[in-house]
Image (spheres, rainbow, N blue to C red):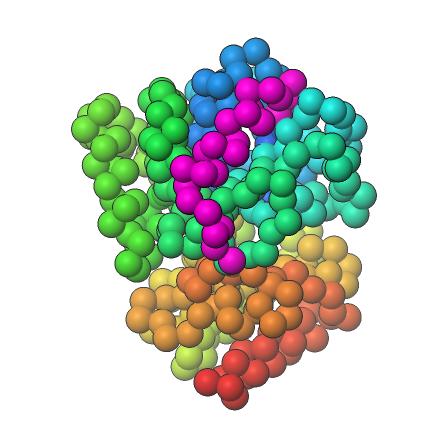
Amino acid sequence: MTTPYSMGEFVAQLTPLFVAARRVWMFMHTSPDLDAVGAHLGVAAWIRHLNPTCQMRLGGADRPRDNLLSVAAAVDPQLYQHIDPADVAFAPGDVVVLVDVADLRRTSHQSTVTVPAEVPVVVIDHHRVTCDATVHYIDASYQSASALVYDLLVLAEVPFTQAHFRGLIMGVLGDSGFFRFYDQRLPASLAMIQQFCANYGEAAYYDLVDVLERNRPVSDYIVQGAYLRNLVISERFAYSTLSLADVAAMQLADDVVSGVNGAGLLRNIGSTEFVFVVKESSPGHYRSSWRTCAGARTSVRAIVAPHGGGGHESAAGYAFAAPSMEAAVAHLLACIEAVAATA
């Protein structure tokens, strides 16, 4: 869905909520990526501008990678707290903010996430999703939530520091694949990079890229190796799997394994149209992540949406139950065939 009212009307709705808030809770989707972290850092500038004294916390069920948290710490060393929303006792005066995700349940691994009716929920997202939040702005014409937040900040005349801008650029880089993923939405993302360099110099941009793209721990290569060992390539697509046994054999922390984007790794392999990875998250439960490749004619969202998955045309996700990894892969292959049969 796309929000039926204007960006200016959204700003007008949101301003009194932030001004009156006693506490603002911002929650990222599970396995938070660059865009999830970066877009929330931009919204943090908005909240602090309107309400300098409110308590503000950024959290979620999964801890982001250390390099992402280093960018967040430059905004506010106390901003990120490893808080699962299911463990929060929400109260009058609270506001919940979700950016890059429209469903609070996708920010937790627990099934007990509830928000009292008197606590407003704000959603800012760039995916094609349905949403019943109190106040929301959803626009899939943006390549990233960070680019959407940037335009909101400019429209609302919110001053933000270089540290906030670094977060927004981080998000743009993540959801553009560091500008490897081309579509009609890319020019707006490139314009943000141009503005950042004009404000702070090219060296500041390359410093950020170094933090995000180059300073990778050795553990990343261990996880990538596991995905590549399980790689299957067909004429049209490629996929890989990661079972609980694979994860146990690596002897790495869960957040380290989750921090490696397996689908992004496969995206540049061969001449495939799209790729996916399927990871066993717990016994009998699986998560799949999908990406299109250059020249793709198929929307990966169209493959998973009929089964409860979501995302956008070039990047999507789908969680489901299956009795085994073999059954999980067979189910996903059937999803692909179902779309091919109706094409």
* Relative horizontal placement of residue 282, taking residue 15 as reference (left or right): right
* Residue 197 image position (x, y, % from top left): 21, 30
* Residue 97 image position (x, y, % from top left): 59, 34
- Segment tinted magenta in the rendering: 1-24
Residue at 69 percent across and 47 percent down: it is: 105
Is 183 situated above or below 148? below
Q: Toward the viewer: 237 or 136?
A: 136
Is 89 situated above or below 180? above
Residue at 42 percent across and 62 percent down: it is: 314
Answer yes or no: is residue 246 visible.
Answer: yes
Is 19 situated above or below 343? above
Circle count: 0
Asked if the magenta segment contains residue 112, the reply would be: no
> Residue pushed farthest bottom?
341
Q: Toward the viewer: 156 or 340?
A: 156
Asked if the magenta segment contains residue 21, the reply would be: yes
Q: Toward the viewer: 50 or 194?
A: 50
> Residue pushed farthest top?
53
Q: Toward the viewer: 326 or 31?
A: 31
* Relative horizontal placement of residue 207, taking residue 72 as reference (left or right): left
Answer yes or no: is residue 86 visible.
Answer: no
* Residue 30 image position (x, y, % from top left): 62, 45
Residue at 55 percent across and 25 percent down: it is: 16
* Residue 322 image position (x, y, % from top left): 74, 69
What is the quadrant of residue 298 in the picture? bottom left
Residue at 66 percent across and 44 percent down: it is: 104
